[in-house]
Amino acid sequence: MSVTPKSREEILTYLRDVLVELFELRPGQIVPEANLYTDLDIDSIDAVDLILKLKELTGRKIQPQTFKHVRTVGDVVDAIEALMTNPAA
């Protein structure tokens, strides 16, 4: 994505594209309520790959503790939105 997403919807769309590309998921599976681990079958190694891809989006190093409590797609959107709106995060 060439333009940094600004809205939650744009972040969700980017995240959906990344999850489809990285993990061959169906776009319809990737809804805010979907649990990354139980619904989308993402494991800890996959999570590292996802964090690396999200670093490209934010342009910032993402600390593991930022994603410590992330469980759902919506949680990822919240975390990315917070990173992008709060330079001190």
Image (spheres, helix red, strand yellow):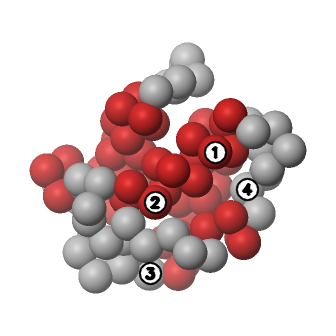
Q: Is residue 74 visible?
A: yes
Q: Is residue 56 visible?
A: no
Kindly report which numbered mark, 2 or 4, lies closer to the viewer in this rendering: 2
Q: What mark, if any, has residue 43 been given in the picture?
A: 3
In the rendered view, tell whether residue 86 sits above or below residue 6: below
Three-letter code for the amino acid on which mark 3 is drawn? Asp
Whole-angstrom CA distance, mark 2 to mark 4, is 15 Å
Whole-angstrom CA distance, mark 1 to mark 2, is 11 Å
Residue wearing tag 2: 75
Q: Earlier in the sequence, mark 2 or mark 3?
A: 3
Three-letter code for the amino acid on which mark 2 is drawn? Asp
Determine the secondary structure under disc 3: loop
Residue 33 picture quarter = bottom left
Three-letter code for the amino acid on which mark 1 is drawn? Ala
Determine the secondary structure under disc 2: helix
**Left or right, residue 64 beside residue 87:** left
Three-letter code for the amino acid on which mark 4 is drawn? Ile
Q: Earlier in the sequence, mark 2 or mark 4?
A: 4
Rendered residue at 17%/58% (across/down): 29
Residue wearing tag 1: 82
Label 2 packing within 10 angstroms: few (<14), some (14-19), many (20+)? some
